[in-house]
Image (cartoon, grey):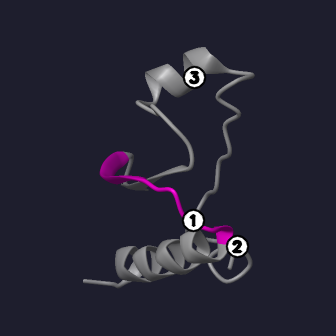
Amino acid sequence: MIDEFDQNVHFVEIDIEEDPEIAEAAGIMGTPCVQYFKNKEMLKLVLFDLSPYSIIGLANSALRALLVKE
């Protein structure tokens, strides 16, 4: 998935145990957590308790929707 969106999407992983200040500043209260941004504006915050495959599927769907040209 990363290769497909390489030019338009940036993925960032934060270890909230290693960097609690960054997690707090980003509004991350638990994991897993996915934040979707467009033009530096947060569009959606999703907290889940799902398998990695479910998270990838949801992220893929959301990214496709965000990248649709208006």
Which residue occupies 56% across, 69% down? 55
Q: Which residue is denoted by mark 3 in the rendering?
A: 22
Mark 2–mark 1 contact, CB under 8 Å? yes
Q: Tell me the SS state at disc 2.
A: loop
Position above or below: 17 against 58: above
For residue 33, the mark is none
Horizontally, residue 36 falls left or right of residue 44, namely right
Horizontally, residue 52 falls left or right of residue 44, namely right
Q: Which residues are magenta?
A: 41-52
Lower sequence index among marks 3 and 2 = 2
Q: Is residue 25 visible?
A: yes
Which residue occupies 61% across, 18% down? 20
Question: Which quadrant: the C terminus?
Answer: bottom left
Which residue occupies 56% across, 49% down? 32
Name the amino acid, label 2.
Ile
Position above or below: 30 against 60: above
Q: Nearest the camera: 15 or 51?
A: 51
Which of discs 1 and 3 lies nearer the camera? The answer is 3
Name the amino acid, label 1.
Val
Structural distance between the alpha carbons of marks 1 and 3: 20 Å
